């Protein structure tokens, strides 16, 4: 059973465990509370708090998610007391001496992390704000100051906005949670970048991914596993199309939850996997759900709740519910809800999931044939402004006092200054505007007939707190107009040495002379009668002549191939 206690004004949860003691201090703050221009501030603060603790014999770490941040460790009671007391002390008096070092560490962490198939799902559903920010690099790191971090800590890392959870038999002696007073922070409202659902978008990954938003309830959690069983049976066992099949159910803290499922494929099987995936969704949507699948999932959950560690395992989720104001239930109450789930409940979830579905499909495929609408990749409106034409093609920019539009054969991209989530600015003059709807508009002054005054209009239009200065680029990486690029490539080609030119001229002349004589001799042998005693001699001369022609032409061939390399 989970006990409710209090430690220095912080709500505390205690549950027994048969293993080593472990504990966590969870705060209701995450990436969804940031803006794109300051994205990374919570993660950076987490790193700064843990950096002075160095290495230890016990395991400790921090984690920053969309709506919460946790400092946790496993070890002895004195070690846990020392760790969490130090965390709170560092949150109150933030150690900023390693600020630039930790920024570099976080940039390295981002650049070296692997790319997962679901990484881009948040931005397609939510855009470049709140819950969509987890798809973006932490561009805000560069401009963050020590004072901004202190203000962030004072606002979010307070005792009213925290929950302590402990898997053990007691609260460790000597533990001090010296945190400032504050207030419980609500979960941010989730934005949407989708005009309509069900929708789909095309991605380079060879996987089909479903993301749906459903009401948080036991039947939705069960449905996620039933969906996985159906996909596994259809795409792996029966058709042999996929290897990795998975599903997930993640509460958002606002009474809703994300329900996700994934199936991978080979390049040549992408169409078949997509078709099979959609067939499974359609089957469940019309209520063709197997009772055996429901029974198997319920039995598996009942076994999990029967273990001695059941309450200790629930502690992080229990703390999350406490922070977000969602109800917490006893194991008996959860078991009763679990056993009450029916096929009709799952059918209802299947319909709800389909209605809010966002489907990620592989390159070269689409899902419009199944009733899914393509997620927007262009804008419906343009701004009024001065026109600047591209130097290479027929596209053009409209730069005005309200925003920027890019018009091309591929569609229109518009970002207004008011709805600009962030603007990346390079020293060479390039600008990239990212709208709240995730529309990206990139401006290369080298490719458009712009004027410095036009770029000043953009810089003055985007609020200064949304502008992010980027490091200088390699001059070779800056795009150039086609004519200038071709001229530079021509000038960059290595010049031939004098001896190469002389050798190629002599080789060419000799090849022409010998080859021409041999060609005439060959034609003469074919069309004019020749005495039998001279035939062998003349044909021998033809063979030798052609061999000499090939040998004389070799310098030209070798020098030309070497230059191409």
Image: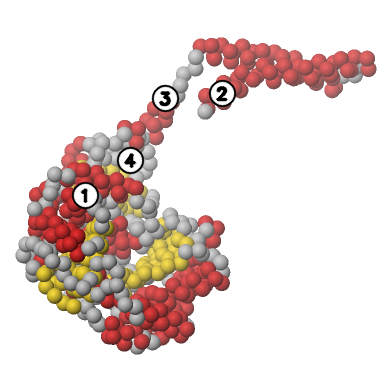
Residue neighbourhood size for the residue with mark 4, other residues' Cα within 10 Å, grouped as few (<14), some (14–19), many (≥20): some
Q: Label 4 to label 3, Cα distance in Å?
A: 25 Å
Q: Which residue is mark 1?
A: 54
Distance from disc 2 to disc 4, alpha carbons, whole Å, reads: 36 Å
Q: Position of residue 497 (x, y in %)?
A: 49, 14
Q: Is residue 337 visible?
A: no
Q: Nearer the viewer, residue 525 or 207?
A: 207
User: Which residue: 25% across, 48% down?
Assistant: 106
Residue 492's label in the rendered image is: 3
Mark-to-mark CA distance, 3 and 2: 17 Å
**Disc 2 designates what residue?**
560
Residue ranking furthest to the left: 181
Query: Which circle's residue, 4 or 1, is located before the other in the chain?
Result: 1
Q: Residues within 10 Å of mark 3 (few under 14, many from 20)?
A: few
In the displayed structure image, the side of residue 62 where residue 411 appears, left or right: right
The residue where tag 4 is placed is 390
| Residue 98 percent location from the top left of the image | 17, 44
């Amino acid at each position: 059973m989970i006990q409710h206690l209090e430690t220095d004004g912080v709500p505390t949860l205690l549950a027994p465990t048969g293993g080593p003691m472990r504990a966590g201090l969870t705060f209701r703050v995450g990436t969804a509370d940031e803006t794109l221009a300051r994205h990374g501030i919570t993660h950076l603060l987490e790193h700064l708090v843990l950096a002075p603790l160095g290495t230890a014999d016990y395991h400790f770490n921090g984690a920053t998610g969309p709506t919460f941040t946790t400092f946790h460790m496993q070890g002895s009671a004195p070690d846990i007391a020392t760790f969490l007391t130090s965390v709170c002390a560092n949150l109150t008096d933030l150690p900023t001496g390693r600020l630039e070092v930790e920024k570099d560490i976080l940039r390295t962490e981002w650049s070296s992390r692997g790319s997962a198939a679901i990484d881009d799902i948040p931005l397609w559903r939510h855009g470049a704000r709140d819950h969509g920010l987890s798809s973006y690099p932490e561009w805000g790191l560069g401009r963050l100051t020590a004072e901004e971090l202190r203000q962030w800590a004072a606002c979010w890392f307070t005792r009213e906005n925290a929950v302590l959870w402990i898997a053990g038999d007691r609260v460790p002696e000597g533990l001090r949670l010296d945190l400032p007073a504050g207030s419980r922070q609500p979960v941010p409202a989730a934005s949407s970048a989708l005009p309509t659902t069900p929708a789909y978008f095309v991605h380079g990954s060879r996987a089909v991914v479903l993301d749906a938003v459903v009401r948080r309830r036991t039947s939705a959690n069960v449905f996620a596993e039933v969906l996985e069983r159906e996909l596994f049976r259809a795409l792996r066992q029966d058709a042999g199309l996929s290897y990795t099949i998975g599903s997930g159910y993640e509460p958002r803290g606002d009474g809703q939850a994300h329900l996700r499922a994934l199936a991978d494929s080979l390049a040549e099987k992408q169409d078949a996997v997509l078709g099979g995936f959609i067939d499974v969704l359609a089957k469940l949507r019309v209520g063709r759900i197997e009772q055996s699948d429901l029974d198997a999932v319920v039995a598996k959950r009942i076994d999990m709740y029967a273990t001695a560690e059941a309450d200790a395992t629930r502690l992080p989720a229990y703390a999350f519910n406490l922070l977000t104001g969602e109800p917490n239930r006893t194991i008996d109450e959860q078991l009763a809800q679990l056993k009450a789930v029916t096929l009709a409940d799952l059918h209802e979830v299947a319909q709800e999931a389909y209605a809010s579905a966002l489907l990620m499909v592989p390159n070269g495929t689409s899902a419009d044939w199944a009733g899914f609408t393509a997620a927007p990749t262009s804008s419906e409106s343009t701004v009024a402004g001065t026109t600047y034409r591209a130097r290479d093609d027929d596209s053009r920019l409209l730069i005005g006092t309200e925003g920027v539009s890019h018009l091309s054969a591929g569609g229109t991209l518009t970002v207004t200054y008011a709805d600009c989530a962030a603007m990346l600015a390079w020293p060479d003059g390039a600008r990239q505007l990212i709208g709240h709807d995730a529309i990206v508009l990139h401006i290369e002054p080298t490719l458009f007939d712009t004027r410095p005054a036009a770029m000043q209009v953009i810089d003055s239009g985007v609020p200064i707190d949304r502008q992010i200065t980027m490091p200088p680029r390699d001059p070779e990486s800056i795009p150039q107009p086609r004519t200038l690029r071709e001229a530079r490539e021509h000038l960059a080609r290595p010049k031939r040495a004098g001896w190469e030119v002389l050798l190629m001229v002599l080789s060419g002349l000799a090849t022409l002379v010998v080859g021409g004589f041999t060609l005439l001799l060959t034609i003469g042998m074919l069309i004019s009668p020749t005495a039998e005693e001279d035939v062998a001699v003349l044909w021998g001369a033809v063979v030798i002549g052609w061999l000499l022609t090939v040998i004389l032409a070799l310098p030209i061939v070798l020098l030309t191939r070497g230059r191409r390399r």
